[in-house]
Image (cartoon, rainbow, N blue to C red):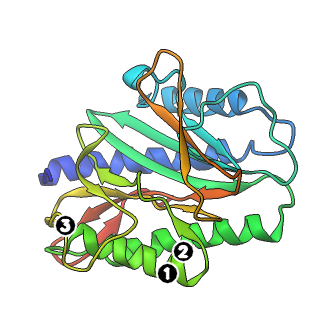
Amino acid sequence: MTTKTREEIKLMERVCKLAAQTLYHTAKFVRPGVTTDELDRVAHDFTLSNDARSAPLGYHGFPKSICTSINDVVCHGVPGPQPLKEGDIVNIDITCVKDGFHGDTSATFFVGRVSDKARQVTEVAKAAMEKGIEAVAPSGTVGDVGFAIEKFVTRKGFHVVREIGGHGIGRDFHEDPFVPSFGKKGKGDRLLPWGTITVEPMINETAAPIIEMPIANSSIKWYVTSDRSLSAQFEHTVLITDAGHEILTIY
């Protein structure tokens, strides 16, 4: 895990605030009939207007500025011409780069009126992220975070995605350590004061395996539930302090 100086933390705070602003600016346009390509353009233009760039665009060949994951898409959904429909849930994942640092955040949004099950899996995903963040502490471990997430999710009758999770972040988009949504207390990489990580549990309606899907001309993959059941995700960038933690992507 890379730790940050005081000046670097200030830059992280600035880019993370912008990522949060971009996310919720883009979310204003979520409604039936809007395409995910249109959401991508909204986010891209807003990012550029704030003297930043979208980290996903061109990252290992990824073709768009944001990820939009609808219903059974777990993560890394590629924006396209498909319109959102009444009852969909859509995760919008934003990462901005400014002054050499990355800010990463995502949330799942309702498209009009959604089913009880869609509401439940979304609410559990948000609360799971919050439980994980509560476990972030100096000299704690990534296992503490994963344990808190999985314990909560399992009790609610849902399932965590194990293959994909959070990560260190800073000058690089993805840094060590991997921050899983499962684990054992006290196990795994140590969390160091003044390091920054993302906490981003992906929560599935069922325990069905996820399927890896290719993206043309990219080494990035997107993932879908094999039984077409719902998946939801929330994400914050979190600073580990000498006394606890601070969420940087609050808007």
Direction from residue 49 to residue 149 in the image, left or right: left
Circle 3 packing at 10 Å, graded few (<14), some (14-19), many (20+), is some
Q: Is there a contact, CB below 8 Å, between mark 1 and mark 2?
A: yes
Residue in the picture at 48% in, 15% down: 217
The secondary element bearing badge 3 is classed as: loop
Direction from residue 143 to residue 54 in the image, left or right: right
For the residues labelled 1 and 2, the Cα–Cα distance comes to 8 Å
Name the spot of residue 219 as percent of width and height, x first.
40, 24
- Return the disc, 2 or 3, that comes first in the chain's sequence: 2
Q: Amino acid at mark 2?
A: Ala
- Return the disc, 1 or 2, that comes first in the chain's sequence: 2
Is 18 drawn above or below residue 42 in the view shown?
A: below
Residue in the picture at 25% in, 67% down: 142
**Which sits in the foreground, 41 or 35?**
35
Is 71 drawn above or below residue 193 in the view shown?
A: above
For disc 3, the marked residue is: 188
Residue in the picture at 71% in, 50% down: 228
For disc 2, the marked residue is: 127
For disc 1, the marked residue is: 152
**Which sits in the foreground, 173 or 177?**
177
Give the total of numbered labels: 3
The secondary element bearing badge 1 is classed as: helix
For the residues labelled 2 and 3, the Cα–Cα distance comes to 23 Å
**Which sits in the foreground, 75 or 51?**
75
Circle 1 packing at 10 Å, graded few (<14), some (14-19), many (20+), is many
Q: Amino acid at mark 3?
A: Gly
